[in-house]
């Protein structure tokens, strides 16, 4: 389809300049591939890079084979979950230019709808899971429709805060005792205050595909027996194989969402979205119904966020409203920015890089460090700083190591700032698919503002 | 076509055709509007929403009177809710001024504003504790605002009655430290992005918020602790009713009102204020008129951050506890207030903050206690549908 614009190759800035020579050669060989193959190469390379990193980290932590594979499975699961959410957000921000910072709200609506429709416990009507999944996506889409209606009348930053407000309203509602005391067709809805509620998950079906009862201790099915045999040959336990199978389901879901969004992106509807992002006035002048296109794209993106939420959050079998704090939304956003908004492949790379390098990587590193060091931590920074007068820096280091999760969050912030300062187009550089079928930009690159 | 359009048109040939296009669309739309039937049908949607909203509010007002009359809500209860709303609303308004100023002069929604509040809260209370407990208690505990919750605030005498110097000193330190932090953020991040889009700045401000929040958590630990001691109370005899206020609330209300009046005087009666309003109105025009825009930006940060720091410090006086996420959780109601009033308008921020504060407390008459914040957000969204530019939007006082 459309390769990167010439002149936007990233050779103009520091990072791009250094790898520019190699990059150009790789790029020219990549450009000979069809777009989707080139995208696949980039994504697979990114995932493999993260795997190598985590393999090294797991080795540093002294994990056995099962532990290492389990780590990789966990990372794969999170990478896939984030990728779905980032892809959905990219439809909003990367294509239609709608600044949605209520991702967590749309996720939670879907998850709780799933709990109400398909749950069999204290809360829930006990319908089959596919009905619950569809209902969840519809509910998230409906909330998206509700949110998009004022959006058409609002400025972009107002709209952002409206979506954040909606997400918070949803979270507070889910948490409230008041909602839990109401009944819908005789079934209780909402959570018991902030206590977690049982939620059915596709994971259970994947597990039951492998063992009779869905638990690792049960008799394996035919497929399960083969897989477990293969696993024990690699020294991998049953539980790891089973969670690996579910991670695989999520990866398949990512591929499906990617295909769907790619189809949308290259359809006439997708071209309208890109035109809106570039210049809404011009799109209107050409007779496009921009308002309708925005609503459609917003609703589709919201239901996909709901899907991502259900596949991810329901897999713990219980869910509480506090799993959907606004910080989750910002994590998804950081992932989108890292990958570079505007391209679906970039979104997946962003999800992969975010989970690998910013979310799970630092946590693994922390375990590696604490495995090999034995520095007593202090309670406060003051207790860590005072021994420095006597030349003892170890208490300070101990305090810092004990709070390494704070550094991980700080690091996310630093990455965001540095990206905005140095590479506002994300890791993959300028990868926005063009609105036009051919490259209309002037040689030497126009400005994009 | 105003001066900035002209400048842009002259400066960049490429933007000329785009600008023309946009203007052509605008002209087309205005033709639409001239069509009376379309105009009426368009207006009717607004009016319908507005009338519905007003009817809803009138119904709630009526219901409130009914509840007061039949005694399901007592007058003293209602007074307490209203007072609590005013106290919180003044804080929202105070913090909103800075947010609104950054929006109108630097043209971006600053998501790190909430964490400026936290900065002010921690630095101010740290100073207040050092002043109040100097020599008697462990300096580490005082400096870090008692991370392990000992010694108790009452023992140190952390109340406006027993150590007014410490409390007022803390207020000043809160403002100063927050200003320094905000200027550093501007120097290292925002200044380099002056010509970038509002969204790029917004995203960068989210990054700044993360760094600031977890830096504060690293320094002051993540524990939630109580800070001020219980203050003395004062009962006013007003003939009909005799409300009781505690001294911390009175301190808070007095400081907030004084600061708001100062901001008003500054904006309306000083050269700096005029320059700020000019820049908020039209940055390019301000620049070619000879206004030193960078210095105005500096003043914006100084005023906005000082007010944010003070607001963060004062909210602790009201809620009694401090934790590193406090400012972040306050950011959304503050934003709600600012948007409600019309983003960019200082008086709108004060009014909007007050409305959001009062709604978030008084709505307890109708909704369960943990949904009052949700009710305030809902009101914000409804008013935005009815008046997309906010209550005082388009006034753009500064």
Image (cartoon, helix red, strand yellow):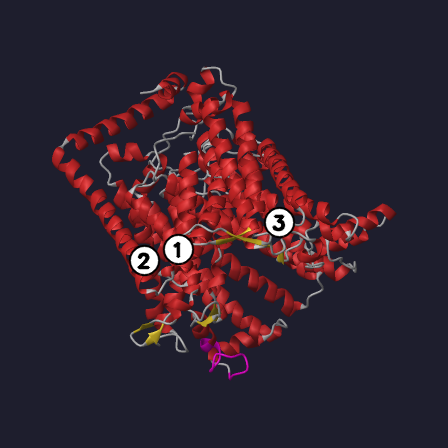
Q: Where is residue A76 in the image (x, y as percent from the top left)?
A: 53, 60
Q: Give the position of the C terminus of chain A as an image quadrant.
A: top left
Q: Which of marks 1 and 3 is in front?
A: 1
> Bounds of the magenta span?
A208-219
Extreme-front residue of the structure: B239
Q: Which of A410 and B301 is in front in this view?
A: B301
Q: In this view, does B174 lie above or below B269?
A: below
Per the picture, the main secondary structure of the magenta-coloured stretch is: loop
Query: What kind of element bears circle 3?
Result: helix
Residue A430 x/y as whole percent: 47, 37
| Both labels 1 and 2 in a single chain | yes
Distance of label 1 from label 2 (alpha carbons): 10 Å
Q: Which of marks 1 and 3 is nearer the N terminus?
A: 3
Sequence-earlier tag: 3 or 2: 2
Instruction: Quickly name the residue at label 2.
Output: B64
- Which of disc 2 and disc 1 is earlier in sequence? 2
What residue does disc 1 label?
Answer: B362
Chain designation of label 2: B
Q: Nearer the viewer, mark 1 or mark 2?
A: 2
Inter-mark Cα distance, 1 to 3: 34 Å
Q: Residue at x 35, y 58 (%)?
A: A140
The crowd level at tag 3 (other Cα within 10 Å; few <14, some 14-19, many 20+) is many
Residue B298 visible in this rendered orientation of the protein:
yes
Q: Residues within 10 Å of mark 1 (few under 14, many from 20)?
A: many
User: Label 3 belongs to which residue?
Assistant: B214
Are the residues at dot 1 and dot 2 in contact (C-beta closer than 8 Å)?
yes
């Amino acid at each position: 389809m459309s390769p990167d614009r010439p002149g936007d190759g990233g050779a103009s800035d520091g990072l791009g300049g250094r790898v520019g020579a190699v990059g150009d050669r790789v790029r020219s060989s990549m450009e000979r591939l069809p777009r989707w193959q080139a995208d696949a190469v980039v994504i697979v390379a990114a995932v493999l890079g993260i795997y190598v990193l985590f393999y090294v980290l797991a080795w540093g932590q002294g994990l056995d084979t099962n532990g290492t594979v389990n780590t990789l499975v966990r990372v794969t699961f999170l990478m896939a979950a984030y990728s779905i959410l980032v892809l959905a957000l990219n439809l909003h921000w990367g294509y239609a230019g709608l600044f949605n910072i209520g991702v967590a709200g749309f996720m939670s609506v879907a998850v709780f709808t799933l709990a109400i429709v398909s749950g069999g416990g204290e809360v829930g009507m006990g319908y089959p899971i596919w009905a619950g999944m569809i209902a969840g996506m519809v509910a998230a889409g409906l909330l998206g429709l509700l949110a998009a209606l004022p959006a058409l009348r609002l400025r972009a930053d107002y709209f952002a805060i409206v979506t954040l407000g909606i997400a918070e309203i949803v979270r507070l509602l889910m948490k409230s005792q008041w909602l839990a005391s109401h009944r819908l067709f005789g079934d209780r809805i909402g959570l018991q205050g902030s206590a977690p509620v049982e939620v059915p998950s596709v994971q259970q079906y994947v597990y039951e595909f492998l063992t009779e009862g869905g638990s690792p201790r049960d008799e394996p099915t035919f497929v399960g027996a083969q897989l477990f045999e293969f696993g024990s040959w690699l020294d991998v336990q049953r539980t790891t194989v089973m969670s690996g199978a579910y991670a695989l389901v999520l990866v398949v879901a990512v591929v499906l969402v990617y295909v769907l969004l790619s189809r949308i992106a290259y359809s006439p509807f997708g071209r309208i979205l890109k035109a809106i992002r570039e210049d809404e006035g011009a799109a209107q002048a050409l007779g496009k119904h921009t308002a309708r296109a925005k609503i459609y794209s917003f609703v589709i993106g919201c239901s996909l966020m709901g899907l991502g939420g259900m596949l991810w959050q329901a897999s713990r079998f219980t869910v509480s409203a506090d799993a959907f704090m606004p910080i989750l939304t910002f994590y998804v956003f950081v992932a989108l920015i890292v990958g570079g908004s505007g391209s679906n492949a970039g979104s997946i790379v962003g999800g992969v890089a975010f989970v690998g390098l910013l979310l799970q990587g630092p946590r693994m590193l922390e375990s590696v460090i604490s495995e090999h060091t034995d520095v007593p931590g202090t309670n406060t920074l003051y207790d860590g700083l005072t021994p420095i007068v006597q030349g003892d820096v170890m208490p300070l280091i101990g305090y810092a190591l004990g709070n390494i999760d704070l550094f991980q969050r700080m690091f996310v912030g630093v990455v965001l700032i540095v990206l905005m300062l140095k590479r506002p187009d994300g890791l993959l550089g300028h990868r926005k698919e063009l609105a036009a079928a051919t490259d209309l930009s002037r040689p030497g690159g126009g400005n994009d503002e | 076509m105003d001066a900035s359009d002209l400048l842009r048109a002259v400066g960049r040939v490429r933007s000329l055709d785009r600008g023309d296009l946009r203007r052509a669309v605008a002209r087309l739309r205005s033709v639409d509007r001239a069509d009376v039937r379309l105009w009426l049908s368009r207006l009717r949607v607004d009016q319908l929403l507005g009338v519905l909203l007003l009817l809803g509010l009138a119904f709630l007002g009526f219901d409130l009177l009914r509840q007061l009359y039949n005694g399901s809500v007592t007058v003293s209860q209602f007074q307490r809710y209203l007072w609590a709303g005013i106290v919180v609303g003044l804080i929202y308004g105070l913090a909103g001024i800075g947010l609104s100023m950054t929006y109108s002069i630097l043209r971006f929604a600053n998501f790190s504003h909430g964490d400026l509040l936290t900065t002010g809260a921690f630095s101010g209370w740290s100073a207040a504790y050092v002043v109040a407990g100097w020599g008697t208690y462990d300096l580490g505990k005082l400096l870090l605002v008692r991370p392990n919750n000992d010694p108790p605030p009452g023992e140190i005498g952390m109340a406006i009655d027993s150590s007014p110097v410490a409390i007022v000193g803390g207020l000043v330190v809160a403002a100063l430290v927050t200003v320094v932090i905000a200027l550093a953020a501007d120097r290292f991040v925002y200044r380099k992005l002056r010509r970038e889009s509002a969204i790029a700045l917004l995203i960068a401000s989210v990054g700044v918020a993360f760094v600031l929040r977890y830096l504060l958590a690293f320094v002051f630990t993540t524990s939630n602790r109580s800070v001020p001691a219980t203050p003395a109370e004062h009962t006013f005899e007003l003939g009909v009713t005799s409300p009781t206020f505690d001294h911390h609330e009175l301190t808070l209300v007095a400081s907030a009102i004084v600061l708001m009046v100062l901001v008003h005087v500054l904006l309306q009666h000083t050269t700096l204020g005029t320059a700020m309003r000019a820049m908020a109105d039209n940055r390019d025009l301000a620049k070619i008129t000879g206004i030193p825009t960078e210095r105005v930006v500096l003043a914006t940060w100084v005023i906005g951050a000082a007010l944010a720091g003070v607001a963060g410090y004062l909210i602790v006086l009201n809620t009694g506890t401090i934790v590193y996420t406090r400012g972040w959780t306050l950011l959304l109601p503050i934003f709600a207030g600012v948007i409600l009033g019309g983003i960019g308008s200082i008086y709108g921020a004060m009014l909007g903050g007050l409305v959001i504060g009062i709604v978030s407390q008084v709505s307890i008459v109708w909704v369960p206690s943990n949904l009052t914040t949700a009710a305030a957000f809902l009101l914000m969204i409804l008013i935005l549908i009815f008046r997309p530019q906010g209550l005082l939007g388009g006034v753009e006082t500064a």
